[in-house]
Amino acid sequence: MAIENSSRRTFLQQISFGSSLLLAPSPNAYSSSNFSPDLYPTLESFQNEDDDYLIRIGVRFKGLVPDGLSAEMRIRQGKIRRAKSYFMAVEKWKHQTNRLSWQMSGLTAYPYTIICWITPNSRTPELSIQIDKETTISLTELFAQQGLEYATDTLDVSVGLLGSQEIGTVDRSFFNVSSDNDKFQFAVMADPQGGDARDMTNGSITRMKIHNAFIENSVSLVSLLKNPAFCLVLGDIVDSQGQETNFDQTLAYFKQADVPWLYSVGNHETKYRLTFGADYDFSGFSNYLAAQKKINGMDKLLYSFNLGKWHFIVWPDPLRKNFWETHPHYFDWLEQDLEQHQDQPTFLLQHIPAHPIGIDPLISYVESVEVKRTLLDILAKYGNVKYVLSGHVHIPLIASRKTAVTYQGMNLINLPAAGFRPRGFGEEDITGGPVQGIAVANIDGEEAKVAFHTVTDEIYDYPASLQEFSPEAYPLWLKHKWELEASDKVQNGDFSEGLKSWHRRFVYEENRNPSNICEVRKWRNQSALYLYSASRGYRVPGQDRLPQTINRICQAISINPDQRPALSFQHQVDNENSNSNEWVGAFIWIEGFEKDLKKLNQVYAIGKAYGNLRDNHRGLTPPTTNYFSLPIISDAKSVQLNIAQNYEENQGSNFLSLNLDRLVVNLGVWTANEKPSQRMGVYFTGFRLDENPTNTALVEVNPQNIWRKGIDHIAGEHVNVEERYVPPHRS
């Protein structure tokens, strides 16, 4: 079913919406290997269908700038047709024919990302960019230099061309569906993660052999379908880091089913440490694009198509550093594509789930808050997106059905893997056996039904009505901690109003004997928060496992920059349901912010300490984590944490110099999830800020009692390995 590159005009029709600055005198005279020569051999190749050039200006502050900063861009011999900003809000936006100006608030969370659509009227146009200093560059120079980057004491600036050659549509003729047929089915295969077991760069031969066996079985399920329109491999086509040998091996498996195959980018299609910059370099995708071309003639990362009454969008999720900061125009393309097809029900197919799953490490090993909410806001804008299917998690089928949600009219479903073993969610799966397989969607007019077909020949329908996801109930999924509402005192510190004013992370709960409990109980004639975490159950050979450490709640509190805060509370370890000799613990975790910049990270550990309490999402260096030890007690005890004093004793600097305006108090329990004996329960109540703190010097946690294990692949499973973390040196 492969489409030859020579017929690309009919198979892949470009959809663009911007990019450029100015035409070079002779585009062919300027070629650049780093600009991915197959896609962008000349400056001219960056022009879109409207003959615009799209440029990106990225500004990242190195620290807070209290008064913000003004910026502008001017163009000679051209006009600015459109402009748009992403991720960080800009103010005082002024758009004129040849001048764009804006104000940046000076926050640090993400780069300020500006996109400009420029229509040239000369072959020698020139840009003047004024951001902390003035820089002038022509489009020709911008192409020849492969982008522009400079730094000042205050910020980093990045300017680059944005292209659209890797964006397109797929012609109907590619699919096994006639243009007048409104009734058809298609298959989705998430996370095969196969490859060449003989290639020693993959790390684990056993792991690869296990995946490959299930991939062949999953492909056979595709072959059993009655003339499916297509089968999409939903990211993580291969294991390891996108080696060519792995793509070739999976291709051999896929060809066993005679159907049109489509690919989507996941986080295993490229090298792990791949970073994107101003040069718009696609060399990191070279193996993926080559493999895609072999199976269907495409060289796309983002594309869409129509079948029957439905519209389909395939969305990339490489999960690599700076990808979205340097490809913001994908969001604009998505918005325009949805607007153009707003009368059609739509499937969005992506690798990374946009809804919470509730098990570590899938709290942090997903797209950032900014990317998730930008994407979801766009998807919900026109009301035409009906289904969002994702992979990445290697989720058991029972958990896939339980976590599937409806959000603003969209059904979001995370699919089990086609090859990878399921992660341990703590309970027996629906089938009691292997749950690898494929998802099958049956389309009838404007109706769609999704089911999962397992390799053991079982079919399970997803419910027509799914539970509603409420961002208000779990605000940390789509908000940063510094965006939470804050009061000048602890609200509901005695838990007399349940969990009101406290924000919980979404935690996956087993149907029986839940391993995580977060509830208010009566304790010593008063209300108290009870937090419990235990190693998840149902441990079977071959099941993939990772530490589970996410049972926590938090509350934001506003403070004055000259305030020396102390926190008082009562706590007691639930001795009957705790085993403090194991790798388990409880904590009070204090984070301090000046606006959006995190400056304080202080952990008070009850028992052993978890070494990954940071929540840092910036490219900036996070603050040093200070660990202090609290005793494990079996009787109720009042404690005061002198946050300011503890910081000063640990860091040797004045707490007030941090200039904090917000604290976030986190309460939590954790377990390494290695063996059944690991469990910890604790009661908390009576939280308040103290005006007159007492001297409460505390002992630092012994580094040997901080959980800092790494993850490795042994015999096909994720397992904990010896410590890899080296604590930062402090003089």
Image (cartoon, rainbow, N blue to C red):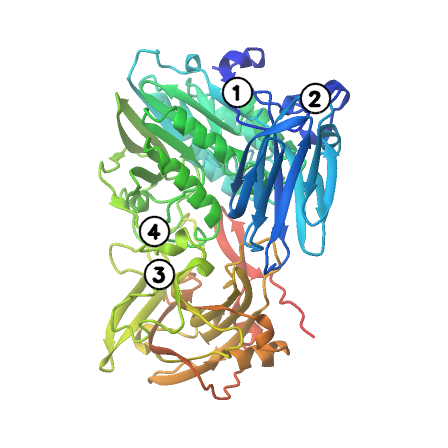
Residue type for callout 3 = Arg
Q: Position of residue 329 (x, y in %)?
A: 53, 34
| Circle 4/circle 2 CB separation < 8 Å | no
| Circle 3/circle 2 CB separation < 8 Å | no
Q: Which residue is drawn at 51% across and 19% down?
A: 296
The residue that mark 3 highlights is 504
- Seen as rendered, the residue at the extreme right is 29
| Circle 1/circle 4 CB separation < 8 Å | no
Residue type for callout 1 = Gln
If you read the primary sequence from the N terminus, does the residue marked by circle 3 or circle 4 appear first?
4
Q: Which of marks 4 and 2 is in front?
A: 2
Left-right relation of 464 to 396: left
If you read the primary sequence from the N terminus, does the residue marked by circle 3 or circle 1 appear first?
1
Q: Which of marks 3 and 2 is in front?
A: 2
Q: Which of marks 3 and 4 is in front?
A: 4
Secondary structure of the residue carrying numbered label 1: loop
The residue that mark 4 highlights is 471
> Marks 1/4: CA distance?
36 Å
Q: Label 1: few (<14), some or many (≥20) within 10 Å?
A: some
Q: Tell me if I can see residue 111 in this picture.
A: no
Left-right relation of 538 to 421: left
The residue that mark 2 highlights is 122
- The label on residue 14 is 1
Q: Label 2: few (<14), some or many (≥20) within 10 Å?
A: some
